[in-house]
Every structure is written in C-alpha cells, then in structure tokens.
Image (spheres, rainbow, N blue to C red):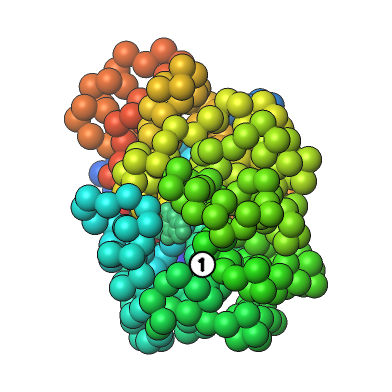
Amino acid sequence: MLKGSTEQSLNNIKDIRFGTWSKPSFKSYVEKSINGATIMNTSQDEPLVLRGKILTFINNKLDYKYWEKGAILIEKGIITEVGNHSDIDAPQNSKVIDYGEDLIVPGFIDGHVHYPQMGVIGSYGKKLIDWLNYYTYPEEVKFSSYAYAQSVAKLFLSETLKNGYTTSATFCTVHPESVDAFFYEAQKIKMRVIAGKVLMDRHAPDTLLDTAQKSFDDSQKLINRWHDNGRGLYAVTPRFAPTSTPGQLEVAGALFSNNNNVYLQSHVSEQLDEVDWVADLFPESSSYLDVYNRFSLLGKRALYGHGIYFSESDIEIASATDTTIIHCPTSNLFLGSGLFEYEKLRDAGIRLGLGTDIGGGTSLSPFATMKAAYEIAQLNNYSLSPLENFYRVTFGGANALHLDNKIGQIKSGFEADLTIIDLSSTDIIKNRMREVKNLPEMLFIQIMLADDRAIRSTFVNGKLVYEK
Ligand code: GUN
Ligand code: ZN
C-alpha cells in the first residue's frame, strides 16, 4: 500500500500493529496498547519516535553503530536524536511506534534504474542490444503519453517503497512527459530522487529519437523545472554512446557543466559487442570510457552503470575524475553481461553504488541485489562481506550519489528516510535466525533469504509511506 500523496497524511493511518510492545522508559505518547500490539494513531507534524534495533554506518571505513534497544526522534522530517531508547529526550507530544525486534536501517539507495522498464522485467532470451531493440524500445515509445508514464511511475514508486528503497536514480525516456510524470509523483511523497530525460539521436526507432538541439532545449527546461525542486535532483541522461551523435554528446557536456550541481547518468562497458560497437563509432577514442572523457562527461556527480570491461587506464581515469560506477548485479547476470570486478574498482578508490537496473535487472529488492553482488564477487574469488553489502545500499550508496551529508545514515541532522526490516519474515529465515551469533551473520541471512516480505515499513522524510 502506497500511502503517499498529500491527502493521505499520517493522520489517516488508523491501526498500525507492530511486534511486541514494551513500555518505554522515557516520556512518550502512546495512544493505545491492545493484546500486546502497539496501535498508534500518528499525525503529520508531531515529533515521532521509532523504537527497535538500529543499525547505521558512520563512515566510509565500514565503522557502524548498532543499538539493540534504540530509538530515533524525528521532527519535521529530520532525525534529531538517535541512541539507546532510555537516553532519548522526546517532547511530551511525541508519537511512538515500537518496532520491537525489528531492525531499523537508513532507507536503501538504488543508484541506477529505469522506471519506464517496469513492463519489460523478465523478458526472455536476448542480450543487451537485441534486448533493447526487441523489448525495451517498443515499451519506451509508450511514454509519449503523460497518463501512461504517470501510471508506470506510480507503480514503480509503490514497488520501490515496498522493497525499502527511499532514493532512486532513474532514467526516464526520451519524452519530457516521462520526466514530468516521474518528478510529480515522487514529489507527492517528498521522495529524494534523481531523474532525467534520455538523450538519443541515432540507432533507435524514429519515435524515440530527438535531435541535439531538441535534447538541449528540453533538458534545460526540465532542469529549470525540477532540479533542486523539493527533494528532486536532475540528471542529464545520454542513454549510452552508441545512441548519441558526437554533436549530442557535446550538448550533454554543456548541460552538465553549465548547470550547478546537476548529475549526469549513462551506461559504460556493459557487454563486449557493445564495447566493440563503440570502438567502431568513435575510432579516435582509446576506450569506451575515453569517449565520455573527451566530451567532458566524467567527474563528480557523473554516474555510470556497469563498467565491467575496464582497462587499467579506464580504472585510473574513473578514479582520477571521481566518476561514480554503479554495479548492477542482477542485470549483469540476467543479460549475461559479465562479472563486475568489484574489489579492483573499490581498491582503486572509485565511488561505487549498487543498482537494480530494472528492467535488465530482475528484482526491485535490495536483498536480491546484494545477493547477486555477493554471488558475482564469489565468482571473482572475493567474499563480499554482509556489512560491506549493507553499507553499499545505505551510506555507500549516498556517497556514490554525493548525498552522504543528507541521507544514508541515522544521525541527527539527516533526512529521516528509514526502512524497518522484520528479521524473521519467513519460516526459513525464522528457523535460521535461531542460531544467529552476531550482526554480520544476521545481515547475511537477510541478504540471502529475504525479499519484500521482510520490509515492515518505510518512512520518507519522516512520514510513513509504506507498511506491510
Ligand atoms: N544500455 C543502454 N540502454 C540500456 C538499458 O536500458 N539497460 C541496460 N541494462 N543497459 C543499457
Ligand atoms: Zn541501465
């Protein structure tokens, strides 16, 4: 259930039942407690206290804080206190939701996704270029209709929240309507999102093509309308080098450098025949990544999906320019793209995030995404630790998007985007959790076995927007 929209405030949420209720030892306002369940009637503007186990990373070295009986005070959408529940000094009129044995983490961050591809998830039998031509482009054509784009944006956002993601960096389509619809729907629930109009002026169906000039005009208008508007941020979005002429890549470079703090998102080095195609199209460039470098499309806030086939010099360039790479593991397996060299890129100091990459990716679950990242690392003889995996979809994801001063941590002053995980959401997990010895093991069980049934609820900007 998506509770977004302004007309559905927290006032309208009547019966919320959560785990075992235990009496808080600090002053709080609990409306009712019936049969051991806390039943809250929370309202929009009063301070809110969430109680439960709490986990947050506190730096990029994987140091974390964990409270077994913790509490978070939220005021006006911002976290103002976090600690042991007995230490929180909550105002008298605070509402309290007690999540008992559930784990509260920062809302998950999806660093690379295509909201318009909800309708092609799980399309059989093709590799990247054929998959785009057979399934993806025909679906994206439909987004010239605002109404269609809006219906898919709503579905995407509700599924995203249901899976515990609170921030997504998403591609739209070539149509400005697809961008307006997405930002409009995200803004209704005050969700922090990054999105942008795809730029494509060749090698795609005519109905999906713009021109260098039109892509400049449309993108600039959309930047003016949506960038830094509420919690929305704009990304200049050339799809990938093969679908833009050099002239359009120049336009993308100009938009990226002329607009303060906008993002740039694209794809790089995902499949071998794609890499060969780029070499044919841009013979003067020394590599796929070098194409983007020549058009001034690398740097801070430049986000590239994949980066599987990087040479040593590509790795050096990505690191030296502080370009972000988003690893999209379920997509890499589904499309047969290859094995991302996580350890190598991380050790080169490249900012790394994790992305679902729907619809090349097969799941909007952070657990499925972390599981696939673990499995790909295994095939590269590297054990990706559960702590590092959770870091990548929280603090590390925020760092990859240059938003780590706002989201990705449970800390005073941070935006209150939070996800509550039921650690025993299925019989198999419950059984497995009986033997759990420590936090990493507990997280690993969730990574390997959990899905959207584990997401008890999701808060965006301090508001309950999803509950199971
Ligand atoms: N490369 C260019 N476009 C796409 C896309 O939509 N999905 C993926 N996975 N790769 C791409
Ligand atoms: Zn993608």
Residue for point 46% across, 22% down? 380
Secondary-structure class at tag 1: helix
In the rendered image, residue 190, in percent from the top left (x then y), is placed at 55, 69
> Toward which corner of the image does residue 3 lie, by quadrant?
bottom left
Residue for point 78% across, 40% down? 320
> Toward which corner of the image does residue 160 lie, by quadrant?
bottom left
Residue 176 shows in the view: yes
Q: Is residue 139 above or below residue 329?
A: below
Q: Nearer the viewer, residue 237 or 18?
A: 237
In the rendered image, residue 321, in percent from the top left (x then y), is placed at 77, 46
Q: Residues within 10 Å of mark 1 (few under 14, many from 20)?
A: some
In the rendered image, residue 385, in percent from the top left (x then y), is placed at 50, 22
Q: Nearer the viewer, residue 18 or 195?
A: 195
Residue 94 shows in the view: no
In the rendered image, residue 151, in percent from the top left (x then y), is placed at 34, 77
Q: Nearer the viewer, residue 350 or 7?
A: 350
**The CB of the residue at mark 1 lies under 8 Å from ligand 1:** yes
